[in-house]
Image: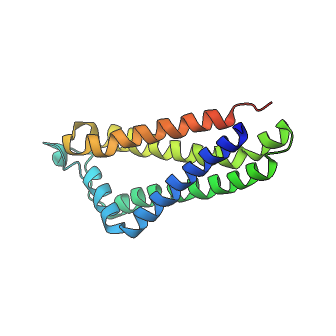
């Protein structure tokens, strides 16, 4: 039963990634606007005047693409990992551990994107922490998602006897 729960949790991360990527793609203009508001630093007083602020379309497009592709890769890797885990669910511990690799890689991609994209770049470089408008709807969920996905990865990665 524990192995089944691990598979279900990996599938939940896959759903998060694929639904998120679909949402970003379906509302691509909204995704671009959100990234642009971060990079322009226009959501807090004096931000747009800061030397780090940019409205460079290449930077904005790259940021949006990074988010979209990271979520899609997370979803695909976790789906493939769940499939392998399902096939190995009745095998020995070594086989099941080997089957977890893609799922754990998918989780790592998600945590990387959330940490680097939102904590390092958005919050650190573009000082999004100063924005009252963006802190609660952007940074708090990113931290929550990263924490939950990392916790799932730790649980899934734990040794099975």
Task: Tell me where residue 2 sits by quadrant.
Answer: top right
160 w.r.t. 100: above or below? above
Query: As drawn, which residue projects farthest toward the front?
Result: 1
Number of numbered labels in the structure image: 0
**Color style of the picture:** rainbow
Name the residue: 29% across, 51% down: 39
Residue at 67% in and 46% down = 7
> Vertical placement of 63 versus 22: above or below?
above
- Identified at 56% across, 49% down, the residue is 12
The answer to which image quadrant residue 134 occupies is top left
**Drawn side of residue 32 relative to residue 15, left or right:** left
Quadrant location of residue 47? Answer: top left
Quadrant of the snapshot with the N terminus: top right
Is 65 located above or below residue 152 in the figure?
below
x then y, percent, for residue 117: 42, 46
Visible residue check, residue 127: no
Most extreme residue toward the right is: 92
Asked whether residue 46 appears in the rendered view, the answer is yes
22 to 9, vertically: above or below: below
Q: Is residue 124 left or right of residue 9?
A: left
In the rendered view, does 117 fall on the left or right side of 92?
Answer: left
Residue 118, horizontal then vertical, whole percent: 39, 43
Q: Quadrant of the C terminus?
A: top right
Q: In the depicted view, which residue is nearer to us: 111 or 81?
A: 81
Depth order, front residue of 34/9: 9
Residue 42 position, x and y percent, is 19, 50
- Picture residue at 30% right of the left edge, 43% below the top: 126
């Amino acid at each position: 039963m524990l192995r089944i729960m691990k598979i279900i949790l990996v599938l939940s991360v896959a759903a998060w990634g694929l639904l998120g990527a679909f949402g970003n793609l379906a509302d691509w203009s909204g995704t671009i606007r959100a990234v642009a508001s971060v990079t322009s630093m226009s959501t807090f007083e004096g931000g747009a005047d800061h030397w780090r602020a940019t409205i460079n379309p290449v930077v904005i497009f790259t940021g949006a693409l990074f988010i979209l592709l990271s979520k899609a890769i997370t979803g695909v890797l976790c789906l493939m990992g769940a499939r392998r885990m399902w096939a190995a669910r009745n095998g020995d511990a070594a086989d099941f551990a080997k089957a977890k690799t893609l799922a754990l890689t998918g989780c790592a991609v998600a945590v990387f994107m959330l940490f680097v994209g939102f904590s390092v770049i958005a919050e650190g470089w573009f000082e999004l922490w100063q924005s009252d408008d963006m802190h609660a709807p952007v940074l708090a969920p990113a931290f929550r998602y990263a924490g939950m996905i990392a916790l799932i990865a730790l649980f899934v990665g734990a040794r099975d006897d």
